[in-house]
Each structure stands twice: as structure tokens, then as C-alpha cells.
């Protein structure tokens, strides 16, 4: 090595060439303008995971749904106007129709739990919507397929909902002044327009409160049928052979329609991801699910009493079996 000149007070030692480190390529300048840019994905990766559900209490200002509010929302989503046709599903398969609902209870309760677990991603984060769950499990095509399927399902349920209510509103016409008579299609259109604002609501707390009214109304229908039978027994305005409780013999061609009614009776999985994403405490959803399914199943078994009252004369909508003088009051 040799000494070389350096500023006064310093000593510089120059190494031989065979001791010098190899030259390196110059790196990017250390300037703020050249720092890597953080993307939205990078920021999302820093969000708190929800795999440890003990710590998930209030993730945002919109997560305001309490435990019992979720119970009422899920229960109301399952029952709805389908409770009017539950006795007819018993009629289709005979006196053992209750077994379909017990089987459906366990099947849909189990799939509800699977959906809840699928909503928690492998990274331990909450997936907020049904299409995104499909995308996370299947891929980009899964998101489109699941999203399209859910849209078709919801449109079909809404169509069935307004048609059932329209059928019942036709019976209200005797209450209208000036002898006004409207067709069933007109009633369906009026009801569809009237219910549209509730579809556009984004206040989930208010929807939960409205669900309490819906559950109470649905519970009152089988109670009304039973009480009406106690006051006006079916045998007083129907022939005994018409109200035989054995119903038709089991036929395979009746099974698809009966199972379709049962499936619609428990169809509310489409809203599960949204409800879970809006909960104050996500880990309470499985318990709320169990209570909702148990209560709804009891409602359906109670509604099945309509078949045991009217037997072979059971109509597709149980309110049509009520005495003529009671039908208007029921729909009112």
C-alpha cells in the first residue's frame, strides 16, 4: 500500500488493485421524489385482521347492528310472505311434510355456517360481499358467476313476493270506496312501487327495526288461522271429506314443488355477508344464526297446522281457506 496526499490532519491509505473491492452499480438517488409509492393494496394489507374475532368490535361507523337486531333481520329475511304457502307444501307431500322442514333446517343452517367461515379470508380479513367471496374462493370468473347468480335469485324472490301480496290485495277491493275494482296486475304494480323505497334504504339499523314488525306480522298469520278455526271450525262451511287430514298420497311429481317452497322458506343466505359486515361483534353471528333458524322453523311447523285444519281443501295460500267474511279482515 502507499500513502497519498489528503487534506491536512487526515491520512489516506491507497490499497493495491488486488485488494480493492469490485465496483458496484450506482443505485437510485436517495431523494423523496424517488421513494416507492404506496398503493391501495399496500394500505389494505396493513388493516387489522379479523381472524381473531375476539378483537373485532367496531371496525367502522357503519357497523352498528347488535345481536338481536341481526336475529330479527335474518328471521324476517327467511319468513316473509312464504309463510302463506307453507301449509300447501304440507299438502303436496302429506302428513309427514314437517320432515322436509326439519331436514332443511339442518341443511341451510350448516351451509350458513360454511358461508360465514368462507367470509373470513386466508389472510384473516373480512370479505364484505357475496361476489367477492366467490372471487376469493374461485377466482375472477367466480366473482362474476356468483354475482350473477345472486342477482337472478333476488330478482326471482322479489317477483314471487309482489305476486303473492298482489293476490291477497285483490281481496281488499270490497273495502274501497265508490265500488272501485282493480285487476291483480294493477295491485302488483301498486305494491311494487310502494315497496321500492325500502329496497334503496342504506340505514341497516332502521331496516333491523322494521324487521321486528315483519316477524310479528308473519307470526300472527298462523295464529290467526288457528284462532279462526277455533271460532269458525272448518267443518261448519266445508264438507267433511274435503278437510280430511290424510292429504294426497305421496307422488314424486309433487316433490320438486314442495322442496322449492321449503328452499324459498330458508333462502336468506344472499344477505348474510352484508349482515356480518355490518355487525358490531362479528363472532356473535353463528349464535344469531342458530336462534334465527330455530325460531323460523318453529314458525313453519306452526303454519303447517293450516294443512291439518283444511286437509285436502288446502289452498296454495292459506288465507284463501278462511271464511269469506274473515278473508277481507285478514288482508286488511
Image (cartoon, rainbow, N blue to C red):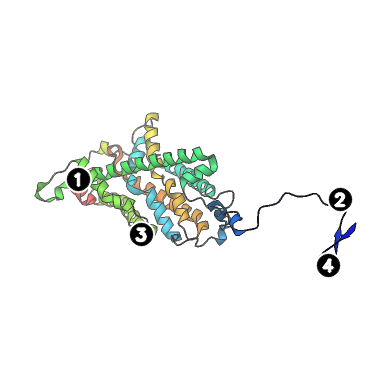
Residue marked by disc 4: 10
Residue marked by disc 3: 206
Q: Earlier in the sequence, mark 4 or mark 3?
A: 4
Q: Residues within 10 Å of mark 4 (few under 14, many from 20)?
A: few
Q: Quadrant of the N terminus?
A: bottom right
Q: Residues within 10 Å of mark 2 (few under 14, many from 20)?
A: few
CA gap, disc 4 to disc 2? 22 Å
Residue 19 in the image: x percent, y percent? 87, 52
Q: Please state which of the two labelled residues, at mark 4 or mark 1, is closer to the viewer.
A: 4
Residue marked by disc 1: 171
- Residue 96 position by quadrant: top left
CA gap, disc 4 to disc 1? 106 Å
Q: Closer to the camera, 47 or 32?
A: 32
Q: Please state which of the two labelled residues, at mark 1 or mark 3, is closer to the viewer.
A: 3
Q: Secondary structure at mark 1?
A: helix
Q: Earlier in the sequence, mark 2 or mark 1?
A: 2
Numbered badge on residue 17: 2
CA gap, disc 4 to disc 3? 79 Å
Amino acid at each position: 500500500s502507499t500513502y497519498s496526499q489528503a487534506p491536512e490532519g487526515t491520512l489516506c491509505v491507497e490499497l493495491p488493485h488486488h485488494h480493492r473491492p469490485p465496483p458496484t452499480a450506482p443505485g437510485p438517488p436517495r431523494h423523496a421524489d424517488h421513494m416507492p409509492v404506496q398503493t391501495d393494496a399496500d394500505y389494505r394489507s396493513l388493516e387489522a385482521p379479523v381472524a381473531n374475532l375476539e378483537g373485532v368490535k367496531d371496525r367502522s361507523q357503519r357497523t352498528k347492528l347488535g345481536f338481536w337486531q341481526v336475529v330479527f333481520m335474518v328471521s324476517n329475511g327467511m319468513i316473509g310472505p312464504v309463510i302463506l304457502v307453507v301449509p300447501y307444501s304440507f299438502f303436496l307431500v302429506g302428513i309427514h311434510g314437517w320432515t322436509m322442514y326439519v331436514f332443511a333446517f339442518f341443511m341451510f343452517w350448516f351451509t350458513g355456517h360454511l358461508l360465514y367461515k368462507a367470509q373470513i379470508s386466508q389472510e384473516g380479513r373480512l370479505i364484505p360481499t357475496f361476489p367477492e367471496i366467490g372471487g376469493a374462493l374461485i377466482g375472477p370468473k367466480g366473482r362474476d358467476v356468483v354475482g350473477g347468480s345472486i342477482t337472478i335469485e333476488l330478482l326471482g324472490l322479489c317477483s314471487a313476493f309482489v305476486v303473492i301480496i298482489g293476490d291477497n290485495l285483490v281481496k281488499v277491493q270490497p273495502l274501497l270506496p265508490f265500488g272501485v275494482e282493480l285487476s291483480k296486475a294493477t295491485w302488483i304494480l301498486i305494491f311494487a312501487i310502494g315497496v321500492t323505497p325500502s329496497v334503496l334504504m342504506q340505514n341497516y339499523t332502521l331496516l333491523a327495526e322494521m324487521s321486528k314488525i315483519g316477524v310479528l306480522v308473519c307470526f300472527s298469520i298462523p295464529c290467526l288461522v288457528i284462532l279462526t278455526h277455533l271460532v269458525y271450525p272448518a267443518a261448519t262451511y266445508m264438507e267433511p271429506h274435503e278437510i280430511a287430514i290424510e292429504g294426497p298420497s305421496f307422488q314424486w311429481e309433487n316433490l320438486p314443488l314442495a322442496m322449492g317452497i321449503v328452499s324459498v322458506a330458508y333462502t336468506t343466505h344472499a344477505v348474510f355477508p352484508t349482515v356480518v359486515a355490518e355487525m358490531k361483534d362479528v363472532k356473535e353471528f353463528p349464535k344469531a344464526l342458530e336462534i334465527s333458524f330455530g325460531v323460523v322453523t318453529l314458525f313453519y311447523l306452526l303454519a303447517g297446522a293450516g294443512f291439518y285444519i283444511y286437509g285436502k281443501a288446502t289452498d296454495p295460500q292459506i288465507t284463501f281457506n278462511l271464511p269469506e267474511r274473515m278473508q277481507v279482515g285478514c288482508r286488511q
